[in-house]
Amino acid sequence: VKSTPDAGEPVNGRDCEAPAIVLGVESSCDETSVAVVTRPGRLLSNVVATQIPMHQRFGGVVPEVASRQHVLALSAVANAALNSSTASIEDVDAIAATFGPGLAGPLLVGTSFAQGLAIGLSVPLLAVNHIEAHVLSVWMEGSRKDRPNSESLSPELPMVSLIVSGGHTELWLVEAIGRYRLLGRTVDDAAGEAFDKVARLIGLSYPGGPEIERIAKMISPSDALRLPRALLPGTYDFSFSGLKTAARRIAEARARDCTSDEFRAAVAHGFQESVVDVLTAKLLAATSDFGCRSAAIVGGVAGNQRLRDIAAQRLGVPLYFPGPGLSTDNAAMIANAALLNPRRVEPGYSVRPSWSVAIRA
Ligand code: KG4
Ligand code: ZN
């Protein structure tokens, strides 16, 4: 598979009519996923083949291994997605794929597959931005409102969306679908990356987020360690490297305790509290500073129940989360984003590993 020269900006969504049934392809990292979604964001199927066991022994995602696994898995995943939907391949009106941001090799595999399908079926090819797809995932069925004081299905705008995944930690002001302002981002590690690194430090397996969450529950809050918070006052930016270093110092100083569940739980608990505190403080500040009518937390770390609970306690506006199984990477959110904000591109359009659709505020 090879990259083609960048063909410029995709056609703006407003000039492109929304298709009725979209087949989405996601391959930007370590999840191979294909989904069939129909208007309005209704899932007909969503099949995710995770490569996590493959990367576990390296403690993180190895791009070359990921590319190869996507090549091996894609056809079977696409067949499974079509078979488990009520649609047949002839019913598909458009093919959507993640064109960025993400790992270049894995993106090339998924977009080449999507382009082949679009050409073969003579249907449009739609380029989806992975981060925008996470943001729009709360427009899908099953997205939960923790404060049910609004009956509307779609979140009320403007909204602040906190994107917390293994590769990104960003705060967006969503003024409209397709109009986003980047309020802040991490200046070092992404939140999920920090979960993964601290988990590794105390001997937990990859991905570290769910492991930290699980082990943190094994201790009472009064026995947890208090770890620092980087609040970076006056900005909506985040920093997690100081926290990671603090956790490393403690782990090194008490290397003998590192195998004890109690010690690991004390570190995990203290770490999780610090991350949750900082994330919710920034989300709360941005929501109030911009007079937002709703807020959302999306991306892999949005699966964290402690984060959901504390954010729901603190926020004074309806708070949205992706539905079950839709926080971590999946193709349903890719097809859904293509339905909500279609960007048509010609086959041969290049992948964009650093693609950003939010304008820095
Ligand atoms: O969105 P995602 O599936 O992939 C990226 O686009 O990066 O996010 C994966 C990240 C991993 O770092 C993982 O440790 C983290 O999300 N994660 C969690 C939880 N579940 C997944 N972090 C904290 N708590 C969780 N329950
Ligand atoms: Zn993601």
Image: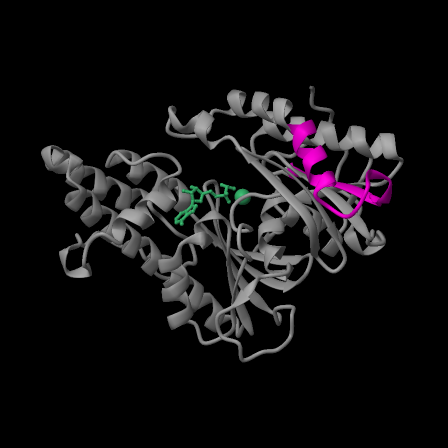
Between 37 and 283, the one nearer to me in the picture: 37
Residue most extreme to the bottom: 149
- Does 11 appear above or below 117? below
Task: Point out residue 358 in the picture as x, y percentages from the top left corner.
Answer: 60, 52
In the rendered structure, the answer to whether residue 300 lies left or right of residue 177 reads left
Between 36 and 14, the one nearer to me in the picture: 36
Q: Residue at x 40, y 38 (%)?
A: 207
In the rendered structure, the answer to whether residue 142 lies left or right of residue 118 reads left
Whether residue 72 is visible here, answered yes or no, is yes
- Does 355 appear above or below 138? above
Residue 84 lies within the magenta run: yes
Q: Quadrant of residue 149?
A: bottom right
Task: Point out residue 91 in the picture as x, y percentages from the top left corner.
Answer: 85, 45
Q: Residue at x 30, y 34 (%)?
A: 200
Residue 91 lies within the magenta run: yes
Between 197 and 121, the one nearer to me in the picture: 121
Task: Point out residue 97 in the picture as x, y percentages from the top left corner.
Answer: 70, 39
Q: Residue at x 84, y 53 (%)?
A: 15
Whether residue 97 is visible here, answered yes or no, is no
Assign ligand 1 to one image quadrant.
top left
Instruction: Specify the segment rendered in magenta.
Output: 74-99
Quadrant where the C terminus sits is bottom right
Residue most extreme to the right: 122
Between 343 and 359, the one nearer to me in the picture: 343
